[in-house]
Image (cartoon, helix red, strand yellow):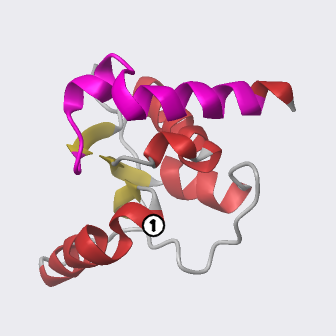
Amino acid sequence: MAAPSRNWLYDVFPSFRGEDVRVAFLSHFLKELDRKLISAFKDNEIERSGSIGPELKNAIRDSRIAVVIFSTNYASSSWCLNELLEIVNCKEEFGQMVIPVFYGLDPTHVRKQTGYFGKVFEETCLQSTEK
C-alpha cells in the first residue's frame, strides 16, 4: 500500500532502550543521520512516564521512517513496547516504513519471542495487564 501524501516533521523516529544502546550505538547513528542532513526525532527533552505521552505519539506519527532498535532489554520496557504498538499502527494507517535493527541479540528471539528477549517480553506484558 502506498503511503498517503503527508508532510513529515521528521525523517526518522528511533525507538530504543536507552540503557542498551544510547552510548554505544544510538549516538553514532544520530550523528551519522545529522551528517547526512536526515532529521531524526531526539527524545532528550521528553518526560518519561508509564505510557507514551502525546508529544511522543505525535513524533512517531510525524516521522516518515521508524527505526526500531531491538536490544536485549528492549522488551523489558513497557515504554518501548507502547512505542512499538504506535509504530505498528502508523505502518498500517499511514504506510510508515519500519526498519528493524537487531543490536546484540538474535533476530529469531524477537520474531519468536524466545530466549531472554521472550522471557522479559512476557513479564513486561503481564505487568502491564495487571495494572
Residue 44: horizontal and vertical position, in percent?
53, 79
Residue at image location 61% in from the left, 58% down from the top: 56
Q: Can residue 17 be seen at all in this image of the molecule?
A: yes
Residue at image location 28% in from the left, 19% down from the top: 1
Q: Nearer the viewer, residue 43 or 59?
A: 43
Quadrant of residue 14 in the image? Answer: bottom left
Q: Can residue 7 be seen at all in this image of the molecule?
A: no
Residue annotated with mark 1:
19
Numbered range of the magenta stretch: 102-128
Name the chief secondary structure element in magenta: helix
Residue at image location 48% in from the left, 54% down from the top: 62
Residue 49: horizontal and vertical position, in percent?
76, 59
Residue 120 sits inside the magenta stretch: yes
Vertical placement of residue 31 versus 42, above or below: below
Residue at image location 58% in from the left, 47% down from the top: 77
Residue 83 sits inside the magenta stretch: no
